[in-house]
Image: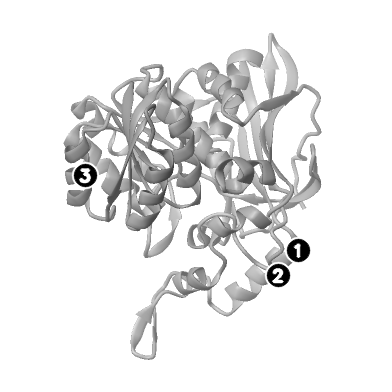
Amino acid sequence: MSKVLVIGCGAVATVAIQKVAQNHETFSEMIIASRTLSKCQAFAEKLNSDKIKVTAEQLDADVVENIVKMIEKHNPDVVLNVALPYQNIPIMEACIQTKTHYVDTACAEVRDHAGFEYGTQWVYDQKFKEAGVMALLGSGFDPGVTSVFSMYAKKHYFDTIDTIDILDANGGDHGYPFATNFNPEINIREITLPGRYYENGKYVTVPALSKKHTYPLAEIGHRDMYLMYHEEIESLARFIPEVKRIRFYMSFGESYLRHLFALQNVGMTSVKPITFQGQEIVPLQFLRAVLPDPASLGPRTVGKTNIGCIVSGKKDGVKKNYYVYNTCDHQEAYKETGSQAVAYTTGVPAMIGTALIAKGIWKGAGVFNMEQFDPDPFMDMLNKWGLPWKENFDPVMVPDDEN
């Protein structure tokens, strides 16, 4: 039985914390730490039982020294980082110093400019090796499950993979004119970046949201899918070296995009500080403060998500196509965890990756991505813990040339 320190108490953490508490065969103790102690205490009071001991702590995870002290106080087997991507590096540094396994759900970012890449975390590989512990990067859905989906396809259905198209669609409706399904600051930073995809050994960059394709998705219908950059493109290109092209698409409705473009045009999505009434503020951070809290969307969001990978390649010299995906119902997710499906589809894989490390099923020393491990145990746990997946052996393919 293992002890886990969970850092963060937002929407995704809400799901991960409850899933850890449900997994009695793996976890016997959980410490929940975040800046807002009252949130952690509420979960500790709710989940503490004779099957799992749950403790609440207050933590500023921007400061390495604070994290080190917290880890040394509780001596967890693994740290699950479900805080903001800004805090990945400080938490990794603390795990190196204390020789503790580390898990996160998204690529590290910095506050003063928009952009992200795995290189900022891969450089810690040698330090984790010297510490004799592992860091598992991107154990969410995308990145995370989409990487595992791709490697499952490679293991079971392909000798070589030519193309991967990742489709992330949210068919949910929360009733607001404009709101984001996870942290608004992180969400908007990613969406407004230039699009980027991998083709023939290099990255191709296009203007943000300039490439669109309408795709028919099971259980949610046709959706407008926009080409974006996402970090699993980088790791998939590294660990499936023969792949010729990898693209990532996300769905957006017309109302969402109208509001986003208007906000962008007046400078509200900028991460550059401005002076207002003698005080320095970041427009995007101010916008985050006035938008609905993603954690509040659960009770009012209806519909489903559909996220998956369309893979093409060859098996025994024969060309073939394959599609593996999951659909998740917002209201079913809310009934179980109090969070909508976007948080649910990230929080469940976060627990699964942590459990696989805690049980020694995925093991090693260094910095790892999901693609480097046997996908089968993870796929089995998706079915067990609320994210069952489906396969389609004759999928509609995304065209080579987008609009």
Q: How is the image coloured?
A: one colour
Q: As shown in the figure, which amino acid type bears the numbered disc 1?
A: Glu
Q: Which quadrant does the N terminus fall into?
A: top left
From the viewer's perspective, tell me whether residue 175 is left or right of residue 356. Answer: right
Vertical position of residue 375 compared to residue 261: above or below = above
- Residue at x-position 41% and y-position 73%: 272
Question: Mark 3 or 2, which is nearer the eye?
Answer: 3
Q: Do tag 1 and tag 3 residues touch (Cβ < 8 Å)?
A: no
Q: Position of residue 188 (x, y in %)?
A: 55, 62
Question: Mark 1 or 3, which is nearer the eye?
Answer: 3
Q: Do tag 1 and tag 2 residues touch (Cβ < 8 Å)?
A: yes
Front residue of 274/376: it is: 376
Q: As shown in the figure, which amino acid type bears the numbered disc 2?
A: Arg
Q: Which residue is mark 3?
A: 70
> What crowding class fits label 3: few (fewer than 14 Cα within 10 Å), some (14-19), or many (20 or more)?
many
Quote the CA–CA distance across marks 3 and 2: 44 Å
Q: Residue furthest bottom?
A: 277
Q: As shown in the figure, which amino acid type bears the numbered disc 3?
A: Met
Check disc 2 and report its element: helix, strand or loop: helix
Quote the CA–CA distance across marks 1 and 3: 45 Å
Q: Position of residue 261 (x, y in %)?
A: 65, 70
Q: Which residue is mark 1?
A: 254
> What crowding class fits label 2: few (fewer than 14 Cα within 10 Å), some (14-19), or many (20 or more)?
few
Q: Residue furthest top?
A: 316
Q: Earlier in the sequence, mark 3 or mark 2?
A: 3
Check disc 3 and report its element: helix, strand or loop: helix
Q: How many marks?
A: 3
Vertical position of residue 15 compared to residue 262: above or below = above
Q: Which residue is mark 2?
A: 258
